[in-house]
Amino acid sequence: MKYLIAIALGPVQDFIAAARRTADLTAGSALLSEIAQTVAKRLHETHKAQLIYPATANQPSAPNRILCVIESDTPHKVANDVHTHVVQHLKEVWASVYQNLPPTISAAIDTELASYQVRNFLEFYAAWVPLNGDYVVARQAVERLLAARKATREFKQHPVNPNRPKSPLDPAYDSVFKEFGQGYRLPSAVVGKPPLYLKPRETLDAIGLIKRYWGYRRTRNGGVPSTTEMGFRALKNYLYEHALSEMRVLEEWQHKLGIDELSALLHQSRWQELKEEHRRDPRWQQFEYEFSEPERAASHARGILRYARIPDEYLSYYALLQADGDRMGQFLDTLTSIEQHQAFSHTLGAFAQDAKTIVERYEGHLVYAGGDDVLALVPVNRALACAQQLAACFGQRVEEFARGQKLEQACLPTLSVGVAIVHALEHLRDALNMARAAEHAAKAAGRNRLAVAYSPRSGEAITVILQWSECTLWHQWVNAFKQGLAGGLPYELLLLVREYEHLSQEQQRAIVRAEAERVLQRKEGHKHAPELPHWLELAHDLQHLAHLMIIARMLAVYPEVDV
């Protein structure tokens, strides 16, 4: 008998967000994709399943939901077999990581607890219904069952040891290290050693160790930039153009000292950390007396930036981009056959590949692209252009699919994107939460929008939401500030907001726009400013415009900006 079976894997967002480094972030995404691929391959190769979503078992960045058709009289046995197989795969992943750890680290691990955590890490949900010819009815039924299964709480809890510290990446799990010193510090034998480079209080769990090891392996291959490196990329071209000799000196010392990223040598605060980390390394001892040369080169490079009115802190701002498709469930309900759904799965797979190309074109790093979901690190000065290109590409892919399937254009899904501009010193989890909140804000405002959140090192975080058709405003206001529009303008407009927000809407409509125009005309460089947007009527509209100006003014500091 044929069954339509749906499988959901987790945890997803919280698991990926459990990261201290960008390498942890990428490794978590890679682990989830590998788990999803393992599930799809087992269904396809062992149980001869007809895959619907994803359309193929080898799709890179496989999604965490699998939909397929199986022919079996015992679908529950198929689901149990797949679950058992993927848990066994996770155990093999852990065994491989454990075997590659140095003896000083592996000897400090409680292998029994680690094995328990690996066995019980995965959230695996499955539901199935008979496929009696009506695919639409069957798919809606299996989705309802799967949602009910996910909402059914399992009361099994992890064993708790009150004398053992929690994992800082996921506090639901205990640390797998056996011994701890004062203040729950790790033994000195495991601190700062490759391949994990643990800090004294990084009491990781087993899954956290897998992420850290996988992240280290990818970093050594040059595949995962740090947040500091991503901040540097926004000014890299300018530095090589105006401080070439200084950058060559830093390149030479990067090679001498075996440092992964050149950006680490640009920051004055990092030099003392680097010396401390490597003070016992023989390679560093032989060069220690010459450290004044690269430190002086880094200081000169920063001085060149300051001369161009680019503050040092701008070397450390980067952007996190999170995108998600709009009304995907409604659109899937319009697909009336398995073949149509498979074709759409191919479309989403193609967009995932497009997303990687687009992000890399803007010098970013793709963390995850599974169907309509995208998570990426991007240089600040290229983030808005990258977001717009992703939305345009998604729309083009969906429109091509709809034309091929002769579907109505009115109900096609769109893309909402959240961009968080944050400082590298912000905790990565907080930055991810900010990007996620921005994406949710874009959807809450009506979908098919770009939300840009900015969290300065000093000051209140702000968010600006625009429809894609309004994104020319970014270009216009960035150019206005570049050409000399007074930087204090947005703050004076915010004073007007506080003055008029208590008035009635009728009173606000009579005065807000005129007052904003009056303030603008008094400012230096006002001739470079674009016309005030048509939607500016009320005090909260003026606040929105002022926040847009604040972000545009920040972006205008960068010599090169793509918006």
Image (tube, rainbow, N blue to C red):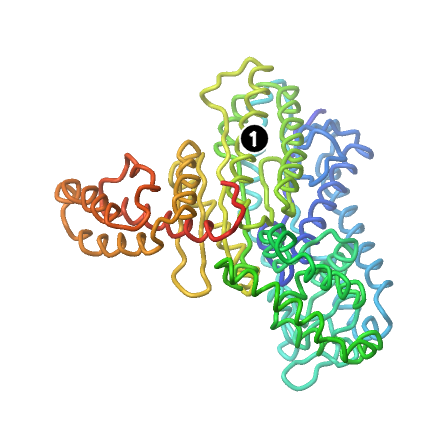
Q: Nearer the viewer, residue 387 or 550?
A: 550
The answer to whether residue 362 is above or below residue 113 is: above
Residue at the disc numbered 1: 394
Residue found 80% across the figure and 54% down from its top: 93
Question: Could you say where residue 387 lies in the image, as x and y percent from the top left?
Answer: 53, 39
Q: Secondary structure at mark 1?
A: helix
Residue positioned most to the top: 406
Question: Could you say where residue 116 lies in the image, as x and y percent from the top left?
Answer: 74, 63
Residue density around tag 1, few if under 14, some if 14–19, many if 20 or more, within 10 Å: many
Residue found 50% across the figure and 62% down from its top: 311
Q: Can residue 173 be seen by looking at this rendering?
A: yes
**Rendered image quadrant of residue 281:** bottom right
- Amino acid bearing label 1: Phe
Question: Could you say where residue 191 lies in the image, as x and y percent from the top left?
Answer: 74, 76
Q: Nearer the viewer, residue 249 or 313?
A: 249
Q: Can residue 126 be seen by looking at this rendering?
A: no
- For the image shown, how many numbered marks are present on the structure? 1
**Rendered image quadrant of residue 458:** bottom left
Q: Nearer the viewer, residue 524 or 332?
A: 524
The answer to whether residue 69 is above or below residue 202 is: above
Q: Quadrant of the N terminus?
A: top right
Question: Along the horizontal axis of the image, is 338 left or right of 307?
Answer: right
Question: Along the horizontal axis of the image, is 434 left or right of 138?
Answer: left
Residue found 65% across the figure and 61% down from its top: 21
The answer to whether residue 552 is above or below residue 215 is: above
Residue found 84% across the figure and 58% down from its top: 96
